Image (cartoon, grey):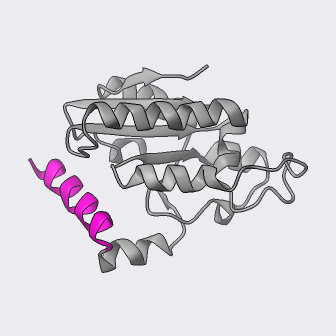
């Protein structure tokens, strides 16, 4: 299957620290159309993150880690995506300075945990509309190969469900 081979190549490149993956990690997140996101595994789940509560996001990351552990961390057996919009984008910003969350302090390890889960194939889709409404330049998003922009968070949630992703919301 072409999509599966593509996913295997991407995961293998990330796992091995390939030059292509390393080069992309330094680039700004790409902008994807809804038709560009494919269900590539038999089991696929989307975790909906439209909240800014730190404890709830920590639990989301715990649930994702547990989800991967049930499949022995096999990135080909399970496909997981986080769709973040509203307050959920703050966990993927390079800094909260100049945002409505400027007075908050996020635990530094939150993004590192998400980055670690990306080694199992985790993808994060950030809502362009949320960035526009909050007057945030897209360059404020963390620059990581597993983070991409989508036109709309809620439209992405619906599109992924239509493609066979199960819906999970923590809390």
- The one of 169 and 55 positioned closer to us in this rendering: 55
Residue 32 in view of the camera: no
Q: Residue at x 84, y 52 (%)?
A: 99
Residue 119 at x, y = what percent? Answer: 36, 55
Residue 24 vs residue 121: left or right? Answer: right
- Residue 142 lies, with reference to residue 74, above or below; the image says below
Q: Residue at x 37, y 38 (%)?
A: 80
- Residue 67 lies, with reference to residue 142, above or below; the image says above
Residue 135 in view of the camera: yes
Q: Which residue is most to the top?
A: 171
- Residue 119 lies, with reference to residue 58, above or below; the image says below
- Tell me the quarter of the image containing the C terminus: top right
Please tell me in which quadrant of the rendered image residue 55 appears.
Answer: top right
Q: Residue at x 37, y 30 (%)?
A: 45
Residue 83 at x, y = what percent? Answer: 52, 37
Q: How many numbered discs, if any?
A: 0
Residue 14 vs residue 131: left or right? Answer: left
Q: Which residue is most to the right?
A: 103
Residue 165 vs residue 100: left or right? Answer: left
Q: Which residues are magenta?
A: 1-17
Magenta run includes residue 15: yes
Magenta run includes residue 128: no
Residue 102 at x, y = what percent? Answer: 87, 52
Please tell me in which quadrant of the rendered image residue 56 appears.
Answer: top right
Secondary structure mostly seen in magenta is: helix
Residue 22 at x, y = what percent? Answer: 40, 75
Q: Which residue is most to the left?
A: 1
């Amino acid at each position: 299957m072409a999509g599966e081979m593509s996913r295997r190549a991407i995961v293998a490149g990330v796992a091995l620290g390939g030059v292509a993956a390393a080069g992309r990690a330094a680039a700004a997140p790409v902008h994807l159309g809804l038709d560009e996101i494919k269900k590539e595994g038999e089991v696929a789940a989307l975790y909906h993150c439209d909240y800014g509560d730190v404890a709830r996001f920590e639990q989301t990351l715990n649930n994702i880690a547990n989800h991967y552990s049930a499949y022995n961390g096999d990135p080909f057996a399970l496909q997981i995506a986080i769709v973040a919009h509203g307050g959920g984008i703050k966990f993927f910003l390079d800094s909260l300075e100049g945002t409505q969350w400027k007075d908050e302090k996020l635990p530094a390890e939150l993004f590192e945990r998400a980055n670690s889960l990306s080694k199992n194939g985790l993808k994060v889709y950030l809502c362009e509309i949320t960035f526009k409404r909050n007057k945030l330049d897209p360059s404020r998003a963390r620059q990581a190969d597993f983070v991409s922009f989508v036109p709309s968070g809620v439209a992405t949630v619906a599109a992924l469900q239509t493609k066979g992703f199960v819906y999970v919301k923590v809390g």
